[in-house]
Amino acid sequence: MDLAIILVLCVSGLLLFSLRRQSSGGGKLPPGPTPLPILGNILQIDAKNIGKSLSNLSKVYGPVFTLYLGMKPSVVLHGYEAVKEALVDHGEEFSGRGSFPVVDRTNTGLGKGACASGIILSNGNRWKEIRRFSVMTLRSFGMGKRSIEDLVQEEACCLVEELRKTKSLPCDPTLILGCAPCNVISSIIFHNRFDYNDQHFLSFMEKLNENLKILSSPWIQVCNTIPALIDYFPGSHKIFLKNIADMKQYYFEKIKEHQESLDMNNPRDFIDCFLIKMEEEKCNQETEFTTEALINTVNDLFGAATETVSSTLKYGILLLLKYPNITAKVQEEIDRVIGRHRSPCMQDKSHMPYTEAVVHEIQRYIDLLPTSGPRATTCDVKFRNYFIPKDTTIIISLSSVLHDSKEFPNPETFDPGHFLDKSGKFKKSDHFMPFSTGKRMCAGESLARMELFLFLTTILQHFHLKSVVDPKDLDTTPVARGFASVPPTYQICFVPV
């Protein structure tokens, strides 16, 4: 027994020495808590509230510090100044995509040497090429323009009709609110929308919701720290991977349908444009435009455009339900600026400072993606007198920016006044970065902003929000705060105005 203890201590000591040696190689990493062998600093992180853990550690180690999530070091950027300096002032050096082992596994089975493709997980030239093409194509289909606004307005009307079918009875709005943004991106990618009662569509939505919850669970944080668990242990990550595989199979079938009816001179949607690009580059052996890349890009666009907006809508409606005085002010502004006889449009926003402030405050308060997605350095970087080696994972604390008490007094309070000046006019803030910032910021930000404004104003134009319990008793605490802040389930009555 004594020998076993000695061996364990020796191995532990060697591992700890190895970790420390890594941290000093080529220069000095930022300070941070002493890591344990193999586990690193995982026991010092609350997997149910990563943002709060990072905030506590920053009080000890400053705005730039090192964490070991397992055997490898990650550098944390905490606070607006550090985040802006890295992602904007040194944007290229911090533009890589860091390791996300559970999600990385979705690319297995793609052949020997297969690398991540698409927008979210890819790196280097592959990422630049696919992102540039995707942004240009989305713009060509009207992202941020009047043509896409018409599409969102039409979907908002469909959403209202679906909410009317609830007949003012209590309902869980999760799937209904998710279907609207899902149909918008579906129209752009597939050139068709789905009926809200389509069972295949609803099953698809349930998979997206389930995956967000799984990704935000403590177990996934453990799997990302110790990747060997993903391959050799059962758990919710298996459900996540199965859901992704099912969705990718669906995308592949839609792509085959598009190939059979493709008109090179008349692209109908994003898939057609990508297929045309593939045809144009078929003689280029190093092309990034492959079927695999198309499947992954569609998966990225579809998931990101659906879940971010639907979760924000669901959370936003819950907050408006809890604070009826705020809701009443929004509806008064809607009545005064828009009225009841036409649909809200984006031109209205400049005349509705209180409503715009509420939409911004919803996004700030819920802190949907507390750490954004993991970044990575694209080269060796000297940052604030520290040396950060190439390919080091960078963790961005968006929570620390969105909940900065100097910029937003009483940041844990839901208060639209955070975005209003003394005269009641809308006030912009450089700290407002729910879509992240820099070269990796969300490619669909303009579409998401449009959807949130139009969907929320259209709902409030047609319905009073009625809680089944006293609004004071509504709990707005996320059920999970890992990769995302997952809103709690609740019941609501949509009562026609």
Image (spheres, grey):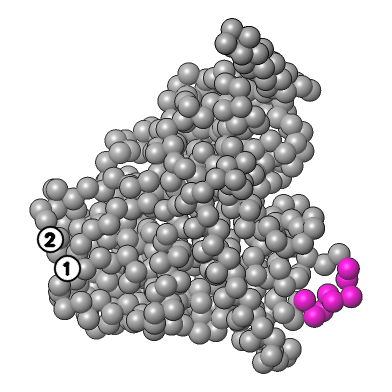
The percent position of residue 456, horizontal first and vertical second, equals 31, 67
Q: Is residue 15 located in the magenta-colored stretch of the structure?
A: no
Q: Which residue is mark 1?
A: 170
Work out whether residue 332 or residue 213 is closer to the camera in this orientation and state it: 213
The disc at residue 217 is none
Residue shown at 64% from the left, 38% from the top = 393
Q: Which residue is mark 2?
A: 468
Work out whether residue 312 or residue 235 is closer to the camera in this orientation and state it: 235
Residue 158 seen in the figure: yes
Q: Marks 1 and 2: CB-CB under 8 Å?
A: yes
**Crowd rating for badge 2 (residues with CA inside 10 Å; few <14, some 14–19, many 20+):** some
Q: Is residue 283 located in the magenta-colored stretch of the structure?
A: yes
Instruction: Give the tally of numbered discs.
Output: 2
Q: Secondary structure at mark 1?
A: loop
In the image, residue 106 sits, relative to residue 230, either above or below, namely below
The percent position of residue 303, horizontal first and vertical second, equals 51, 64
What distance separates the C-alpha of mark 1 from that of mark 2? 7 Å
State which region is magenta: 278-285
Q: Classify residue 495 by image quadrant.
A: bottom left
> Of the residues shown, which amino acid type is indicated by label 2?
Val
